[in-house]
């Protein structure tokens, strides 16, 4: 739809994730450039005054070098249920149009809307649904403009058996040159039968932790709290009305015909969305392994080990045995310059499109 907008001579506000796969995201960037349209991404935290100030301070070395960044998406995601046959399509729905470029297949979930996030043909799990916001910020703090060279993922759909195919539990490590970046999804609540209350890290269930030599930054959608390594808060950078600022930047860019005035240009949206897709690819190509075996092998990386240990305690709280529970463990390698895989199945970088919902090969 973003490409169609450019072809129709329209400027476009494209919500996250801006793509369903890495390849089509780059085509959207090329369409913006070719048709010279203003195309913005819906990662509104890039317009937060507090976050922008924190970015400047980190990049200036105020808190010392960044040692790692860890994005969190702990959101309650209950089972979507399990069907035994194809579900009826509501009469008001144009099923062909609804499916768009995805395969036009029978509906195999109880709720048509929203739960598409948890099935591969249309969705990308919570790493793509919510996580793109956090990884966009984490990558920005690291000062990385492109994709990493290595990606490792471990996870599964744990705690229930339903029609969902994306993982509700996922940990991913991105091997950037500046520092490693981690992202974690937890879809189960804090404890079994505990309602919707979720685990937290430094008071956040959704956000980013940026660990620097001299401080630790806890980043929400619109502000940053800075702590010393004794846990004492030393600064609070408030964000202002970041949503208003985000939309205002879009209008300002249109009025001035200047893509450079955007706080979240489509290129940034593409790269951060691609991170989600790469994390999912690493997961999908993985092999089954006992959680405890994987956790033991992760101890060479102290931060990876810290995250794995927290995930283990999370499983304990749900009565999910570490020693006998299988998770999928996978890894891929990427060439950031070409956005292709040097290790892993290149076929998962794009999809087969149904006419007329076809993304052009070039412009």
Image (cartoon, grey):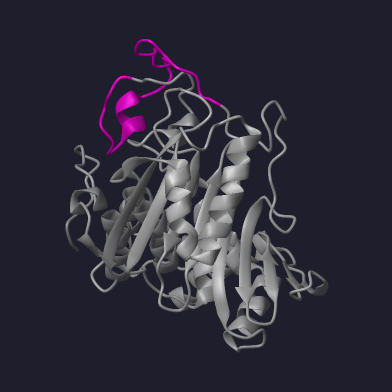
Which stretch did the figure color magenta?
Answer: 79-106
In the displayed structure, 362 sits above or below 310; it is below
Is residue 264 depicted above or below 79 in this figure? below
Indicate yes or no whether the magenta region holds residue 102: yes
The spot of residue 184 in percent (x, y) is 53, 52
Residue at the image point whose x is 68% and y is 38% from the top: 190
Quadrant including the C terminus: bottom left
**Front position in the image: 324 or 227:** 324
From the viewer's perspective, tell me whether residue 86 is left or right of residue 143. Answer: left
Task: Name the residue: 46% across, 33% down.
Answer: 325
Is residue 8 toward the left or the right of residue 63 in the image? left
Residue 33 pos. (x, y %): 31, 70
Query: Residue 15 at what x, y percent from top left?
Result: 48, 52
Residue 60 picture quarter: bottom right
Q: Is residue 116 magenta?
A: no
Provide residue 316's location: percent of width, then percent of height.
62, 36
20 relative to 254 in the view: left or right: left
User: How many marks do you count on the picture?
Assistant: 0
Quadrant position of residue 97: top left
- Asked if residue 135 shows in the view, the reply is no
Predominant SS along the magenta part: loop
**Which residue is at 33% across, 32% downward?**
99
Determine if residue 237 is in view: yes
- Relative to 147, residue 347 above or below: above
Q: Quadrant of residue 86?
A: top left
């Amino acid at each position: 739809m973003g490409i169609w907008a450019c072809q129709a001579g329209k400027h476009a506000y494209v919500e996250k994730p801006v793509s369903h796969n890495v390849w089509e995201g780059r085509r959207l960037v090329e369409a913006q450039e070719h048709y010279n349209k203003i195309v913005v991404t819906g990662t509104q935290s890039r317009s937060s005054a507090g976050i922008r100030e924190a970015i400047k301070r980190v990049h200036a070395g105020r808190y010392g070098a960044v040692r790692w960044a860890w994005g969190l998406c702990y959101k309650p995601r209950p089972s979507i249920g399990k069907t035994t046959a194809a579900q009826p399509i509501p009469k008001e729905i144009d099923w062909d149009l609804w499916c768009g470029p995805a395969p036009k297949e029978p509906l195999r979930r109880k709720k048509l809307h929203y739960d598409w996030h948890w099935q591969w043909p249309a969705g990308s799990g919570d790493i793509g649904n919510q996580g793109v916001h956090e990884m966009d910020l984490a990558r920005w703090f690291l000062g990385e403009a492109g994709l990493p060279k290595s990606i490792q993922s471990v996870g599964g759909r744990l705690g229930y058996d339903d029609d969902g195919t994306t993982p509700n539990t996922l940990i991913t490590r991105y091997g950037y040159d500046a520092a490693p970046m981690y992202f974690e999804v937890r879809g189960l609540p804090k404890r079994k039968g505990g309602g919707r209350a979720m685990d937290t890290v430094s008071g956040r269930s959704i956000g980013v932790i940026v660990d620097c030599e001299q401080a630790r930054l806890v980043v929400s959608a619109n502000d940053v709290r800075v702590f010393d390594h004794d846990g004492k808060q030393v600064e609070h950078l408030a964000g202002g009305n970041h949503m208003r600022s985000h939309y205002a930047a879009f209008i300002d860019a249109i009025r001035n015909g200047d893509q450079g005035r955007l706080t979240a240009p489509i290129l940034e949206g593409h790269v951060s969305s691609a991170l989600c897709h790469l994390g999912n690819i690493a997961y999908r190509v993985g092999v089954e392994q006992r959680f405890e075996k994987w956790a033991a092998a992760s101890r060479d990386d102290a931060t990876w080990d810290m995250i794995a240990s927290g995930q283990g305690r999370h499983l304990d709280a749900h009565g999910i045995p570490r020693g006998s529970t299988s998770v999928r463990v996978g890894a891929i390698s990427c060439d950031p310059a070409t956005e292709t895989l040097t290790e892993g199945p290149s076929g998962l970088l794009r999809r087969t499109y149904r006419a007329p919902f076809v993304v052009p090969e070039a412009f």
